[in-house]
Amino acid sequence: MRLLYTILCMLIILPRCTKDAPAWTNAAAGLVAHAGGNVDGVQGTNAIEAVEYNYNMGHRVFELDFNLTSDDVLAGIHDWGEKNIAPAWAEFSAKKILDRYTPTSYEQFIRFLSTHKDAYIVTDTKSYDLTDAQIAKQFQIMYDTTEKVDPSIRERIIIQVYNQNMYHLINKIYKYPNILYTLYATPDTEDQAAKFIESEHIPVVVMPPERANQPFLDRLTGLGARIYLHTLNDYNEVESWRSKGVWGVYTDSLLPKDFAR
């Protein structure tokens, strides 16, 4: 499938092709380290230690979960627990994650990017649960943070959008060059998703395996999109999906060296 895709691109049959794909999709064997990737056998920390460890293991693209504290610090965390009550940053950062890992802010991850010029982050902001005002606040904070540290880092931030409305909201703040459309929470049908991807030239799409039927994969590939699945941790399963046209995956434990051959 991948060879056929490349040949069609060379013949200029496809509307958007491999040569136009985002640079980050060619990094780290098409792997995205989910929640920063496993560290010490622990997954889902969203901590700087996970990113640093997996960077040293060859990863270059890191998906990270972010939520706002009560005093509007964007923190690396999947959620605020059953009560869903956000603490202040001072409270959150005062206690180690699992007594071992550093509670990490968006700014700290941005500063990591500033010193690791070949690294990227994918934002997972859970924005499908938020109001338009809350989404705008999150992404204004992101913009202001990069403005303070280094505006050029925005080129290496991959914005994961959950629906069409969110995409247009973010564009009012800043038009990020790297957009990834995730399908696990969208109300869009396959046809609606494909038309949106085509009309807005969305270069990368991610979905759970249960949505990845072959006709849909073929349609999106025909539009020039690269397709990722989440979250897979079995080498053979990943290779099977790649034979069907999937470009890469989010993973907790797989490493780029696993695919070196």
Image: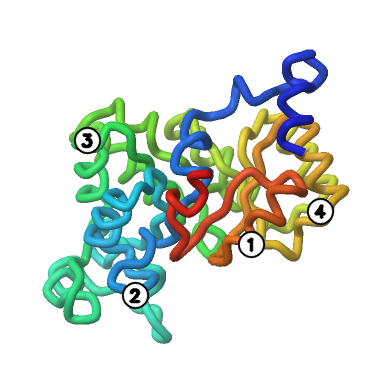
| Spatial separation of the CA atoms under disc 1 and disc 2 | 22 Å
Q: How many marks?
A: 4
Q: Which residue is mark 3?
A: 114
Residue 53, given in percent of the width and then of the height, sits at 26, 57
| Spatial separation of the CA atoms under disc 1 and disc 4 | 29 Å
Quarter of the rendering containing residue 180: top right
| Mark 1 or mark 4: whose residue is earlier in sequence | 4
Horizontal relation, residue 102 to residue 221: left or right:
left
Residue depicted at 28% across the width and 72% down the height: 40
Crowding at dot 2, Cα within 10 Å, few <14 / some 14-19 / many 20+, comes out as: few
| Mark 4 or mark 3: whose residue is earlier in sequence | 3
| Amino acid on which disc 3 is placed | Ser
| Mark 3 or mark 2: whose residue is earlier in sequence | 2
Q: Secondary structure at mark 3?
A: helix
| Spatial separation of the CA atoms under disc 4 and disc 2 | 35 Å
Tag of residue 236: 1
